[in-house]
Amino acid sequence: MNRREFLQNCAGVAALAAAGSPAALPPLRAAETPRKPKTNGIQVGSVSFVDEGTDKVLDFLQERGAVDTVYLTTFTYGRGLAGRQIPGQPFPDHGAQISDEKTFHGGNYATPHPEFYRDTVLKAAHAPDHGDLDIVATVLPAVRKRGMKLHCSVEDVFRFDVQGVREVAEVDLQGRRTGTLCLCHPDVRAFWSGLATDLCKSYEIDGILFFNERNGPLLNALGASHAQSIASSRVTCFCEHHQRAAKERGVDFERARQGYQALDRFVQAALKDQRPADGYFVEFWRLLVEYPEIIAWDRLFDDAKHQVLAEVNAAVKRVRPGLQVGFHIEHVNSFNPIFRATRSYADLATKADFLKVVMYNNCGGERYANFIRNVGSTVFRDVPKDELLRFNNHLLNYGAEAGLDELAAAGLSADYVFRETQRALAGVQGKCKVLPGIDIGIPTGSHSRKASPDDTYAAVVAALKAGADGLILSRKYSEMQLANLAAAGRAVREAAGG
């Protein structure tokens, strides 16, 4: 099947989904059969196994979703990967139908072994959510009996009341401690390497999937993301460890601090609609020319983030060379050209065995629209937002997506998934695997796109047709309707000829 035929096929699927049509999806002809995935994984938190029972969950995953790999949330203090459905969203048709918002705590859902954390003030405290339960020890034997694989997912999301966080927290532009960890701090780097080593030595798992969705100071100052407010006065990090790293690179700390203070003034003036004489974009670019340290300081964060991944990879390989290490590539990488420039797939491919690249098309419409409105409030404030969206589509090589007013309700298309998969595969140049993250029921606003079986099927088909090495069904099982899971499984089985 050539590209034109594929796009026509995806357009038909997308049209069915957009119309909510109950009609059957067009069957795949033999010549259109997508590539058989090497991995069909799913992200699952411990609460699902506790609520529903390990065997019952694994039955659903295998029988309905054709899942062969479980990405088990093992360490996080966040509810994005752990916990039941988030408040305000409908519960799926399985699991407990009551929120755990008031009882959720987070932490290490496995058993931490102190000898791996001797070089850090951070301790991987056992999560109290399920008593003494060790979720890895519980799920791993059941996974093995079924011939499945298990990776431990670890996420850089902390609580400020966790022991050691205050000592290693980032410092913002005003000199205040925050609740996020400084990736230049040696104790933080020792923690992540220690946690990965602990999990890989203590359990016969298949690997680690590392999550870090934090952005550097430049994008945070501009609000150049979908999931954050514009907080230019609270950008990080300006701690002593960042200062030391900057000095090693010949970056002037005081000039960088002054540059971000000037950027803060620019952003705050823009939000008050105080237009510079030469316009917003020219004034922003003038700041970068006057303070190149703004970019250099932003690079400190990105380089530290990627260095942590490299160190985690090395730590895992010291335990057993065949263990796999993956890096979650956050959604802003998809629709922010500035962020894209800091995420070289070719470079990341040398640090990981696989990249889980977010291609969440249903919630993608809402997120992309939020991004456009954010950057359209600062740097591109002079540009009408609907025109800014069309311009950005050209920069990103997006196809025919919905306009700004309809984008949240329409979501992004299956063609978007296809193009982003191809971009990632071209970027890694065969040096590591690409596993697209497929959106199955990720929460959105009341008037935004919701995942349907048609959406899920079309997205999976698109990723596999583009040549993906596998899939990771996301964000977590406790948000997914079983019909959507079954639609993903149907597409995977068809690809495999089953």
Image (spheres, rainbow, N blue to C red):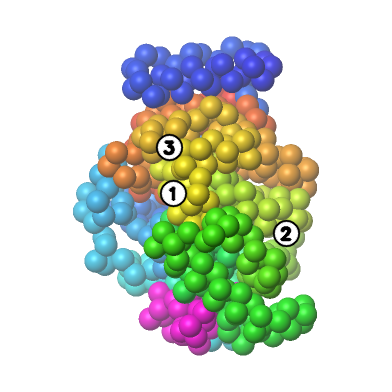
Q: Is residue 363 magenta?
A: no
| Distance (Cα) linking label 2 and label 3 | 37 Å
Residue 366 x %, y % = 41, 43
Q: Quadrant of the N terminus?
A: top right
Q: Say which mark, if any, is on residue 373.
A: 1
Whether residue 378 is situated above or below residue 252 in the rendered picture:
above
Q: Where does the magenta region start and end?
A: 159-184
Q: Label 2 sits on what residue type?
A: Lys
Which residue occupies the extreme front position in the image? Answer: 277
Q: Label 1 sits on what residue type?
A: Arg
Residue beneath disc 2: 351
Identified at 47% across, 42% down, the residue is: 384
Secondary structure category for the residue under label 2: loop
Point out the tag, 2 or 3, that comes first from the N-terminus: 2
Q: Quadrant of the C terminus?
A: top right
Q: State the residue in front, 131 or 389.
A: 389
Residue beneath disc 3: 404
Residue 192 x %, y % = 59, 72
In the image, which is nearer the foreground, mark 2 or mark 3? 3
Secondary structure category for the residue under label 1: helix
Identified at 41% across, 59% down, the residue is: 273
Q: Label 3 sits on what residue type?
A: Leu
Secondary structure category for the residue under label 3: helix
Q: Badge 3 local density, few (<14 within 10 Å), some, or many (20+)?
A: many
CB under 8 Å between callouts 2 and 1?
no
Q: State the residue in front, 125 or 377.
A: 377
Q: Badge 1 local density, few (<14 within 10 Å), some, or many (20+)?
A: many
In the rendered image, which quarter is residue 69 located in? top right
Identified at 73% across, 44% down, the residue is: 427
CB under 8 Å between callouts 2 and 3?
no
